[in-house]
Amino acid sequence: MVDERSVLKWLLMLGPLVAFLGCSSTAYQAKEEVYLFSYFTGNGEDGLHLAYSLDGYQFKQLEQGVSVLTPTAGSDKLMRDPCIIRDKNGRFHMVWTVSWNEKGLGYAYSDDLVNWSEQEYLPVMEHEPAARNTWAPEVFYDKEEDRFIIYWSSTIRGLYPETQSQEEDGYNHRQYYVTTKDFKEFSDTKLFYEPGFNVIDGTIQKIGDEYLLFVKDETREPPRKNIRIARAQKPEGPYAAAGSPITGNYWAEGPTVSKVGDYWVVYFDKYIEKKMGAVMSSDLQNWTDISDRISFPRDSRHGTVFKVEKLFFDNLPFER
């Protein structure tokens, strides 16, 4: 005959172990989340595209690769480099490049990735007469200050002559930013990162007590065109000098970062080769190229990888 008190005692002893295994298992957690990828194709004329992955390596298109949101913001009405993040209340916020040469960026929000707010044009560089563009904006949610940091790359004619080149139409970017708590009132535009080289395509990750800024070194003479990392103690900086390149002997841009299992994976656009690439690291110091292990939808360009709950993903109405 089974002693019920002994069984109960055994279960109570085992309970914490079961709970510990359930909470700490990387494999278990991975099954409960799905990786989404927001991206554009072509010149960004048709708008937002979405893809998904169950493992963080193999991404498949949603809605048969058809755009799920048509761009309306700005004069040129493009939707390039779409960056999507989620705030503490579960709302998604998206910013994007609206034009090759306008002085603002696009913004919209959604609670379900299906129904979006009215798209807005945020004139973040309109105050600067010599500004040429507003490229690849990203938004970072600063939990400590309960605010959003929107940052992007712009060329301002006449600035930083020491890195000026006549190649590639003479663009010579630095990164700028504004902050906001509600996307209605914004701080003044300020310089975000001046690394001593032509820089575009930044993305921030808070890892431990540090903020890591992954950027593209856009230097043309001699060509670098690689991804590097700068570090800071606050999300708005100041960021230290960028480290050595983490990408290989190819041109890369548009980094986006996600934790996959025990590894940090940096995905990027190998735009000359017209395909996506990736590197991974367990310590953020030593990087391995895994471009041959990943797959993305054909023609996908610069975007953002982010995670959602499996239940949320299962309820999305988009065709798999």
Image: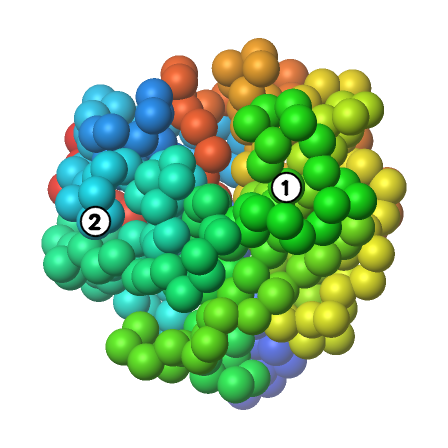
Q: Secondary structure at mark 2?
A: loop
Left-right relation of 58 to 221:
left
Q: Residue at x 72, y 27 (%)?
A: 220
Image quarter hosting the C terminus: top left
Which circle, 2 or 1, is nearer the viewer?
1
Q: Residue at x 66, y 52 (%)?
A: 159
| Amino acid at pointer 2 | Ala
Left-right relation of 190 to 224:
left
Q: Secondary structure at mark 1?
A: loop
Residue 209 in view (yes/no) = no
Taking depth in this image into account, of 192 and 162 the one nearest to the observer is 162
In the rendered image, the vertical position of residue 64 relative to residue 171, given as above or below: above
Residue 131 in view (yes/no) = yes
Taking depth in this image into account, of 68 and 169 the one nearest to the observer is 169
Residue 26 picture location, percent across and down: 61, 53
Q: Point out which mark residue 73 bears.
A: 2
Left-right relation of 134 to 65:
right
Taking depth in this image into account, of 269 and 26 the one nearest to the observer is 269
In the rendered image, the vertical position of residue 188 relative to residue 259, given as above or below: below
| Amino acid at pointer 1 | Asn
In the rendered image, the vertical position of residue 118 relative to residue 246, given as above or below: below
Residue 307 picture location, percent across and down: 44, 52
Q: Point out which mark residue 128 bears.
A: none
Give the residue pinned by disc 1.
Answer: 172
Taking depth in this image into account, of 160 and 194 the one nearest to the observer is 160
Residue 69 picture location, percent across and down: 18, 41
Q: Residue at x 38, y 77 (%)?
A: 186
Mark 2 crowdedness (10 Å alpha carbons): few <14, some 14-19, many ≥20: many
Q: Residue at x 19, y 55 (%)?
A: 119
Disc on the earlier residue, 2 or 1: 2
Question: How far is disc 2 from disc 1 in space, using C-alphas?
Answer: 25 Å
